[in-house]
Image (cartoon, rainbow, N blue to C red):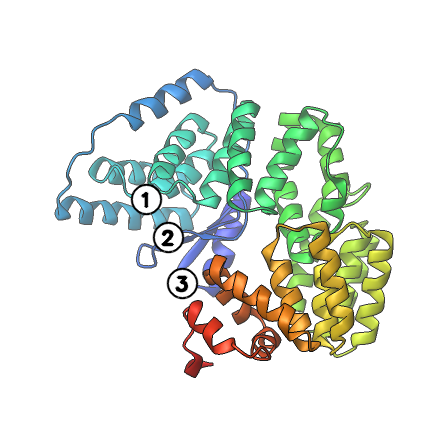
Amino acid sequence: MAAALAALVTALNASAGDFFLIDGMMVDDISAGEARDLGHWAPPPLDVRADASRLSGMIMANLPEIPRSSAEINRSRGHLEAADNYIRSGEYAKALLELKDGLALNPRGHELLSRAGVIAATLRRFSEAEGYMRRYLQERPTDLVHLSGLAAVLIRLARLDEAGAIIDRLERLRTEYLPARFNRLCIQVIREVDDIDRDWWTRRTIEEVGLTSAWLASDRMDLIQVMGAEDYALVCDIALGPGTSDRVQEIATASAEAYQRQSQSLTAELSASLDRLQSLGVHGTVIDRARADLLAASGNGPGAIAIWKRLLESSPEWPEGWMLYGRLQMKFGAHAEAAAALRKALDQSPKDDRFRFYLACARALNGELKAAQEDFEDLARRRSRDMRSWIDADEILDRALKRVPNYTAILRRIEIPPESE
């Protein structure tokens, strides 16, 4: 695992100078601030006493806060910088020593705690890793990356109930969060749960397949130690596609290639990558979704719509699918069809305000101004911040809002000056 980490760090540093990657966690240099979430990192297992880990956490939680001078904090940042240099060169034990020295000067330094948790887990020092992560989460209790990391550590300590509680917390903070789903799947397979939501995994994006296959590839032997070879194969079958456990590394490589080509709008090359993933056994719905995106990006609306119709005929109880289909119809000017699809999405998931917003947009574009205006006003009252981000995500949504008579009042309510629009 250390070799894989070093390769990731080296590769990323070759193209970007202000951050590095540790098993899916993008960590900023000290000048850049907080960690940024790329997904999930999953450290390997180690047989340690859970009681020691819990005791360590209790001791650290009850330490009195000691005022620190600016000189001590500045010195701690020197240790952080030294640790970053060791991480880049793959000298993780030395990096952890520097982080410990920094924490002696600044015990609540979130950058120090973040790195210490990840590095300790990488070195299979899980009792230490748990302590650092819990201390970090005392300061930042809603940090998704570190909650996910803590759940992964607890799984490897065979403390599945505690890991499950952390995953519950994650899912309350963000539904459909891939790292939480992956950790949940591992627990379900270990516990031989019957009602695993297999359909959810068949509907992922190429990027999500890339992340999942990378985790499964890098931690293959470690996960087999935790759950056994048969259960590891079952996780692969569910998450990637039937019979894929022997091709996980190939899928990870092909997915990364496909995602890069998708980002660069390389149509012919992306099509070849999708053919490769299909031959490796990746779920067919994943491939079809990507092909529909490819057609839509090249302006072939009818082709993309035809694929989505076929997908939804085979999976009619898929609210996210109806939402994506409705937005595709909206993009190509089929506003009545878009409204019908988005109504199905909302009917299947009536608490999801994203679907309500997109339906309001489709209605506005379809001339149903009164109904659209009522929904916009309601959402502006309840979800003003989210509504701003939804509008910013797609120019057509901004145009839809401007169809309703009182759109300037709605913009003011969500704190967007009308003159800036």
| Residue identified by numbered label 3 | 17
Q: Give the vertical position of 352 relative to 264 (above or below).
A: above
Q: Nearer the viewer, residue 73 or 399?
A: 399
Q: Where residue 268 appears, x then y in whole percent? A: 76, 73
Mark 3 secondary-structure assignment: loop
CB of mark 2 within 8 Å of CB of mark 3? no
Q: Work out whether mark 3 precedes mark 1 in sequence or the reverse, and give the earlier one.
A: 3
Q: Where residue 156 appears, x then y in whole percent? A: 55, 28
Mark 1 secondary-structure assignment: helix
Q: Work out whether mark 2 precedes mark 1 in sequence or the reverse, and give the earlier one.
A: 2
Q: Nearer the viewer, residue 123 or 261?
A: 261
Q: Which residue is rendered at x = 56% and y = 67% of the image?
A: 376
Q: Does residue 367 appear left or right of residue 143 in this picture?
A: right
Q: CA distance from mark 2 to mark 3?
A: 15 Å
Q: CA distance from mark 3 to mark 1?
A: 21 Å
Q: Work out whether mark 2 precedes mark 3 in sequence or the reverse, and give the earlier one.
A: 3
| Residue identified by numbered label 2 | 34
Q: Where residue 66 appears, x then y in whole percent? A: 17, 34
Q: Give the vertical position of 277 relative to 59 (above or below).
A: below
Q: Amino acid at mark 1?
A: His
| Residue identified by numbered label 1 | 110
Mark 2 secondary-structure assignment: loop
